[in-house]
Amino acid sequence: MSPGCVAPGIDEPRRLQRPLSSQSLWELENSSPTSSPPAGVGFQPRPQPPSWPNSLQLREAGMAATLTLYPSSRCRWDEPVRIVVRGLAQRQRVTLRSSLRDEKGTLFRAHARYCADAGGELDLMRVPALGGSFAGLEPMGLLWALEPEKPFWKFLKRDVQTPFVVELEVLDGHEPEGGRLLGRAVHLRDFLAPGVRREPVRAGRVRATLFLPPGPGPFPGIIDLFGLGGGLLEYRASLLAGNGFATLALAYYDFEDLPKAFGDINLDYFEEALCYMLQHPEVRGPGIGLLGISAGADICLSMASFLKNISATVSINGSGFSTLRAICYKETHVPPLGYDMRKSKILFSGLLDIVDVLNDPVGKCENPCMIPIEKAQGPILFIVGQDDHNWRSELLAQIASERLQARGKEKPQIISYPGTGHYIEPPYFPICPASLHILMKKPVMWGGEPRAHSRAQVDAWKHILTFFYTHLVGTHKGPSPKL
């Protein structure tokens, strides 16, 4: 360590001194990618952008440093970038800060302290952070370590047609509030890759949005489901389309004319959505993939168990049980396991810990409240966080594995991540350790340690893409090596 450089440590993010004006933010957020859609025939993932430096770099009089992003200042949210600062003094101590505002106006911030090398350059792929919001070699730390000013606020992208605008700043020194501004750049992170088509779906009872990859189809199809938040979330489906999958972001309650409250899960509705995908001319059959998180994962497992033409299913922190509401399909009724709030705990922070409130699944894999996953036609991938505080996902995945093997099925693939909480999102999403529970009406703990959770999200995304490539496309092609 060079003289004058501080030892690693973590402290709170600091306020931005010179944020972008609301006018410039509006112009950037409402701009569209300038590159043209890639050409291709059939299934063809989006090619990587060429390596040119940051075209939105901001230069101001008196700024000593140049902050550049590679391969470009604009990319998809699930793609990494390389951040390089040049024009610094030898071994100069600096602080890098990042910030963005979500669509509700909440400010997210992160910062880290660094020392430049002997040539006055700072490359975040080579130089570890000495402290701040994170420490160590974390090239994407200024994104995954973003924290909201508002307590218990979850990072979400609601309108995928506009990018998130990330402001990056370089400040002199390691002072708590930051020193003189040396350089600044703007980084746009998209959710719609160039050429991806977004089509609202109002077909029969189905309320959804279909995302189609660039180029001519047909493409392998996926239905994407979220948990108890309700509404229609599109950000994961749009990113999947950027990776070559025709993806249906499906709402199932609290959206337009759908039921306002979360009730019994009637699979007839989801079967209608499945038929829509199978009959779509740009979706390749004969089978569809399913991806869900939390309660959405349990719906996916139910669909795979009762419906035909499902080739692959990914469960992210699902339970494998009918938990809060019954699951119904024709004459079949899987009763809910239920829960007991007396088993919840109030933590020292005041948060509610609900990890143990589910009723004990007596009989384990033979419990009548368990989804009959042995009926699934295609393979199942379980992604679980060992620190999930919504319920004990790792234990529940093991029970699901026992059920499959007890009925003569192959042992499923379970990928378990230490230090990882409930909301396993696409790469570089800031962790949500706690937020307001839609049913409890109180802030609850979701679990996860920021660094471990972030690494799990990157790794899980690679496994999810590879799993769907293998079972929907028939190849073992993985995601971009940049991940």
Image: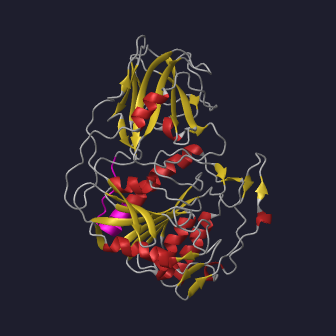
Residues shaded magenta: 466-481
**Where in the figure is residue 37, as x and y percent of width and height?**
24, 48
Q: Is residue 416 left or right of residue 72?
A: right
- Can residue 125 be seen in this snapshot? no
**Where in the figure is residue 53, as x and y percent of width and height?**
31, 30
Residue 244 falls in which quadrant of the image? bottom left
**Where in the figure is residue 411, as x and y percent of width and height?**
48, 74
Q: Is residue 365 magenta?
A: no
- Colour style of the rendered protein structure: secondary structure
Residue in view at x 56 percent, y 78 percent: 371
**Where in the figure is residue 370, as x and y percent of width and height?**
60, 78
- Of all residues, the one furthest to the front in this rendering is 257
Q: Is residue 141 left or right of residue 378?
A: right
Q: Is residue 158 above or below residue 26?
A: below
Residue 66 falls in which quadrant of the image? top left
Residue 207 falls in which quadrant of the image? bottom left
Q: Is residue 301 above or below residue 331?
A: above
Q: Is residue 293 left or right of residue 468?
A: right
- Of all residues, the one furthest to the bottom in this rendering is 331
Residue in view at x 48 percent, y 72 percent: 412
Q: Nearer the viewer, residue 463 or 247?
A: 247
Q: Is residue 475 magenta?
A: yes
Residue in view at x 65 percent, y 77 percent: 336
Residue in view at x 40 percent, y 73 percent: 274
- Of all residues, the one furthest to the top in this rendering is 62
Q: Is residue 373 above or below residue 81?
A: below
Instruction: Tally the numbered discs.
Output: 0
- Can residue 68 be seen in this snapshot? yes
